[in-house]
Image: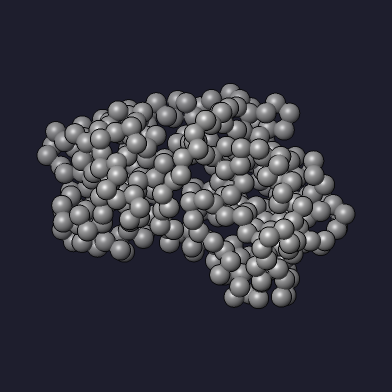
Amino acid sequence: MWVCATCGLAQLREDPTVPEEPKGVEPQALILQAAAAVSRVEAAGLLPADGTVVEYGSPHGGSWLGILADRGMVPVSGAARADLIVDCFGMMHAGDQAAALDERTARLAPGGTLLLQYHSLETIVRHRQWNALRHGHYAYYSTTALLAMLSAVGFHARTAWTFDLYGGTVLLAARRDADEPGSADEAIDALLAAEERARITDPRTLAGLQDAARDQARALRDWLKTARATGQAVLGYGAASRAVALLHIAEVDSDLLPAVTDASPAKQGSRMPGTSIPVISPDELIARCPDAVLLFVPDLLAEVRASYPHIEAAGGRWVRVDAHVG
């Protein structure tokens, strides 16, 4: 990761890979957060009646268009302008950040609102979420850096909302300077103050993520070795890219973790990259009756407990990798 000394944007130094990722199943936590986000935007008076919308979504899946359609918003395609531009974890996948922001702002109709949702860099640092860094994710936004990027194209942040998703997700609403006076509200001020206290644009602050990677990898390997030594059968859940990095750095293979489960049929039958660990279906997970299931995506906990009660009914337990391993 590099951080710009001028604007504070954190980015991957380079990303030579262009893989076509298999689509994941949209987590229930993401669906619920999208509904809550749209409700807050509506309450703030930023959803125009019978307005138009363009969505820039994440390549990992998920969409707000259905929820917005229920509010009377109409999607437009091609190069048409819209009253609302929604980017939910989309722009971070763009190798050319300036071009990506230019594209989005150019499609916003006069008087319209740009909504940008991002996993806060301050959250990533505070929770030591080092494996949020991965190929395909070029940019990692602080509110400080994003406001500077918006200012450079004649936009200002009007307000923002925070959500618990991924430990701390921000939805920022921005408008053109020409459409209304630029003045940040208390929500923006609070985000900026928290980032200043955290020294979020200081490279020395971000360097702590390297220590987190080493510490968490060691803790995971030690935990799995202890489980094996005590005769516990452990499987994983969530074949996400963040799990790939953790397993590889921890040098965990199928001898310590025999399989990882994922609900996406596109991932089943493959393996975790860089390891010999196969990806299996939820049916096979239930059939194996593990003593513990290591959950690599903590936001899924409530969903998997409700979807697969068989695990706990058979005496097994769910173990969040962030809370219990490192």
Q: Is 47 or 22 nearer to us in this picture?
A: 22
Left or right, 106 with reference to 249: right
Q: Which quarter of the picture shows residue 141?
A: top right
Pinpoint residue 93: horizontal percent, then vertical percent.
57, 43
Quadrant location of the C terminus in the rendered image: top left
For the question of whether residue 184 can be seen, the reply is: no
Residue at 61% from the left image edge and 33% from the top image edge: 10
Q: Judge left or right: residue 289 versus residue 50.
A: left
Quadrant placement of the N terminus:
top right
Q: Is residue 100 above or below residue 171?
A: above
Q: How is the image coloured?
A: one colour
Q: Where is residue 265 shown, x and y percent of the image?
A: 33, 56
Q: Nearer the viewer, residue 119 or 271?
A: 271
- In screen coordinates, is 233 left or right of 73? left
> Going 41% across and 41% down the picture, which residue do you hit?
241
Q: Which residue does the image show at 50% across and 59% down from the upper left?
A: 62
Residue at image point 49% right, 56% down:
61
Q: Is residue 235 visible?
A: yes
Picture coordinates of residue 146, whole percent (x, y): 69, 42
Q: Residue furthest front?
A: 78
